[in-house]
Image: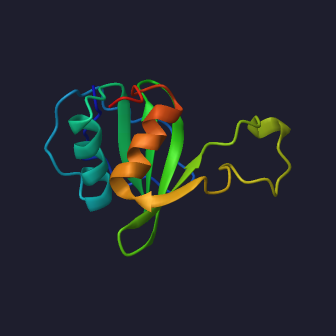
């Protein structure tokens, strides 16, 4: 089930899953892009992902897990998709980013679909 909360916006580095424990919440989080991503995921039938705004970005995570993807506004209607780095934080150099480089830049719908397919939260035929 999508985690819909009115929790304060996460900082750029705060990527832990929401801890509200609520399955149902008001339709708006105060972060328009996160609300759009929730609607897209819901429309695609994805029920195992939480969505939260983090500054200008939107982060997505699987239920009970940390974020796996970050969507960044690029300009106009374009968003960039970056997945979480697979290098463990204790094995990364201090200068190694937490996120991989942008993998895809496209319209929000397409970026959300690719993020969900990338973690097997959505079947490719959706």
Where is residue 36? Give x, y as percent. 26, 53
Q: How many marks?
A: 0
Instruction: Give the residue drawn at x 65%, y 50%.
Output: 99
| Residue at screen point 37% across, 47% down | 52
Identified at 45% across, 60% down, the residue is 106
Against 17, residue 105 (above or below) is below
Front one among 100 and 89: 100
Horizontal placement of 106 versus 23: left or right?
right
Residue at the farthest front position: 125
Q: Nearer the viewer, residue 105 or 66?
A: 105
> In this view of the protein, can residue 55 be seen by the observer?
no
- Quadrant for the C terminus, please: top left
Occupied quadrant, residue 85: top right
Q: Position of residue 55 (x, y in %)?
A: 44, 63
In the rendered view, would you say 52 is above or below 64? below
Question: Residue 78, relative to residue 30: is it above or below?
Answer: below
Residue 69 relative to residue 41: left or right: right
Q: Is residue 86 visible?
A: yes
Which residue occupies the foreground of this view, 12 or 118?
118
Q: Residue at x 67, y 56 (%)?
A: 101
Residue 73 location (% of width, % of height): 44, 66
Q: Is residue 71 left or right of residue 47?
A: right
């Amino acid at each position: 089930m999508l985690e819909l909360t009115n929790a304060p916006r996460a900082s750029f580095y705060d990527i832990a899953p929401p801890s509200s424990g609520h399955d149902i919440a008001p339709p708006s989080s105060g972060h328009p892009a996160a609300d759009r991503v929730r609607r897209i995921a819901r429309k695609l039938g994805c029920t195992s992902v939480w969505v939260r705004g983090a500054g200008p970005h939107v982060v997505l995570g699987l239920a009970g897990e940390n974020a796996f993807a970050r969507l960044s506004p690029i300009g106009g209607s374009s968003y960039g998709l970056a997945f979480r780095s697979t290098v463990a934080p204790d094995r990364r150099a201090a200068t190694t980013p937490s996120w991989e480089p942008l993998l895809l830049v496209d319209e929000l719908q397409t970026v959300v679909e690719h993020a969900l397919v990338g973690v097997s939260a959505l079947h490719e035929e959706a």
